[in-house]
Amino acid sequence: MKKVAHKNRAIFTREEVIILLKLPDDHYEIGLRDKVLLSLMYASGARAQEICDLTVKDIQFSKKGASLNITGKGRKRRRIGISYECASLLKGYIDHRKIASLPERHIFSSQTHEKVTVSCIEEIFKKYVWIAKQKNSGLFIDDSYTPHSMRHSTASHMLEAGVPLVVIKNFLGHSSLQSTQIYAEISQNTVDMHLREWNERWFSIPANVDHNTVHDNEMPDFLR
């Protein structure tokens, strides 16, 4: 079988995610919505359409966090948990909107519709990524980031944290492990990048330095 080249997937680093989540101004209605939406997308790894479809009845809060009943591709449903921090943010937003007693209401709305659309979420990402690029030189280096970039980032960060692929598969709602395997390749690229930086930092010798003059005390302590 011919090997099919995967499309390059833009992924946020953990530092970039932190920056992105701090950008929306929650003193304003739209800013509050955007902060909760971006935070939930990272915490859940959900697709943009799944976030659009999320209603009040799909969320069950507990002392330790919250459980989300997500309807994915092919109308397949899965149940996932999110952290206490994100759950608190989400609950506060639902209470703010006064929709806690309205099970059929959608969690996120636009300025013109009761239910936010995928195109609206795409514009939200475009807006904050653009702001982030202006304020953070050297970060957000990919040409284009989409809402799916957050899903890719969640999966990649979970893998780097040691979460097994099969768990990530169920969390994301993939139909097969092969779909999840791509994140192992993405994570390996991240590992390679860090290893390259580490090697360049500790083992490279400037061109104008005589190899015979390199002293033992220039070697990192942990390698002695």
Image (cartoon, grey):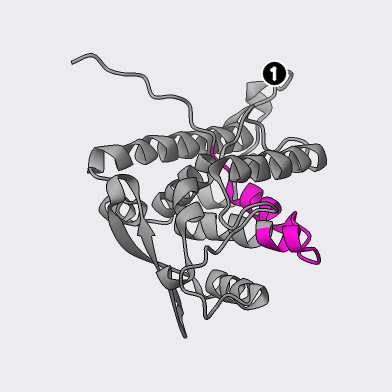
Which quarter of the rendering shows the N terminus?
A: top left
The location of residue 78, given as percent across then percent down, is 31, 60
188 and 39: which is toward the camera: 39
The region drawn magenta spans 11-33
Q: Amino acid at mark 1?
A: Ala
* Residue 135 quadrant: top right
* Magenta stretch: helix, strand or loop mostly: helix
Identity of the residue furthest to the bottom in this view: 63
Q: In the displayed structure, does residue 194 sit left or right of residue 155?
A: right
**Is residue 104 inside the magenta stretch?**
no
Residue tagged 1: 207
204 and 40: which is toward the camera: 40
**Is residue 16 inside the magenta stretch?**
yes
The location of residue 204, given as percent across then percent down, is 61, 28
Q: Residue at x 62, y 51 (%)?
A: 17
**Does residue 224 show up?**
no
Asked if residue 91 is positioned above or below residue 28 in the image, the reply reads below
**Does residue 89 show up?**
yes
Q: In the displayed structure, does residue 59 sit left or right of residue 39?
A: left
Give SS at disc 1.
loop
* Residue 128 quadrant: top right
